[in-house]
Amino acid sequence: MKCRKCGTTAVINMRQHRLSLCQECFLEWVPHQVQRTIEKFHMFVPDDRVLGAVSGGKDSLALWDILLSLGYSADGIYIHLGISDGDYCDVSQQKVECFAAARDVRFQVVNVAQEYGQSIPQVARRKRGRSTCGTCGLVKRHIMNQVACDGRYAVLATGHNVDDEAAVLFQNALHWATGYLARQAPVLPASHPRLARKAKPLIRLYEREMAAYALLRGIDYIYDECPYSKGATTLFYKDLLNQLEEKSPGAKQQFYLSFLQARREGRLLPMKSGQVDMSVCQRCGQPTTAPELCAFCRLWD
Ligand code: Q46
Ligand code: ZN
């Protein structure tokens, strides 16, 4: 198998793009794809300060690496969730620390248990009606938004790839969850002074491509998945979409990108705009649809 760009031996064959590339060409191609995505969706510009949400996994560390290699000013935020099975959070924090130290870049750690008195599994056990992942998602969104706003970052960037987005889209479409569909966008503008702009620069790249990128760049990431991800419905949908992809290479990307195009062209209307009236939480000052305290602040009461 030969590299389609330079003719040397290819290290990866991407059937969905009908493209085989050698290591050098692949390591140029991935950042180029990310740059195109950033520009196409007007995510941010070179002068913007970017805050990358890093978990210690391949996608978020690869995203950070790509943003730095493209010349963006990108700091990191790592949230220690207090998940101790197999030392999951301690190990993932170490991966982030090593990555940042090797590149001399800034990152901030927020330790949920130290900051708020309880770890994610502890608070989730107390809140019976809410799953651990539901609690975790709420806490992470709140903290990332707060750090991005307090630090006056232009944008919060996350490492969602096309596999992640297609699985969420599949789930939302199965339930015709129009509110979620309306908000599933590559960029969410800062629609409130205390809401950070959010962007997903990896949405054109497959999970497999990100794993290859991390490997070829020598990025040391945590291989283990979070223990709470076992049995998650999004993993089931990812598996279904992978079966489809096997038979029809590119189907996953086409499914997601066609949705974005239909969304852009207004072909999904009537759909709820996703805009709702917001007030401000009386305790933390973040926007909320609740009358007094936001869901995050109620969680700790
Ligand atoms: S970290 Fe948190 Fe995920 Fe673990 S507890 Fe669930 S949501 S699976 S991205
Ligand atoms: Zn609050």
Image (tube, rainbow, N blue to C red):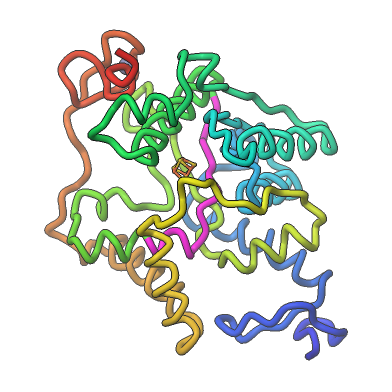
Towards the viewer: 239 or 177: 239
Image point (51%, 36%), residue name: 156
Along the viewing direction, whichever of 95 and 12 lies nearer the viewer: 95
Q: Which residues are magenta?
A: 153-167
Look at 45% across and 32% down and name the residue there: 140
* Quadrant position of the C terminus in the picture: top left
Farthest residue to the left: give it: 270
**Relative horizontal placement of residue 222, taking residue 48 as reference (left or right):** right
Report the residue at 64% width, 61% height from top. Answer: 210
Residue in the picture at 42% in, 33% down: 141
Q: Is residue 157 magenta?
A: yes
Q: From the viewer's perspective, is residue 182 above or below residue 291?
A: below
Q: Where's residue 296, x and y in %?
A: 33, 23
- Residue 108: x percent and y percent? 64, 24
Where is residue 174? Give x, y as percent.
Answer: 22, 66
Q: Quadrant of ligand 2?
A: top left
Q: Residue furthest right?
A: 8
Residue 133 found in image quarter = top left
In the rendered view, does 33 fall on the left or right side of 163?
A: right
Residue 15 quadrant: bottom right
The verdict on residue 54 being magenta is: no
The one nearer the camera, 258 or 59, is 59
Is residue 20 toward the left or the right of residue 147 in the image?
A: right
Residue 292, placed above or below residue 264: above
- Indicate the quadrant containing the N terminus: top left, top right, bottom left or bottom right: bottom right
> Measured from the top left, where is residue 130 in percent x and y?
28, 35
Q: Is residue 84 above or below residue 38?
A: above
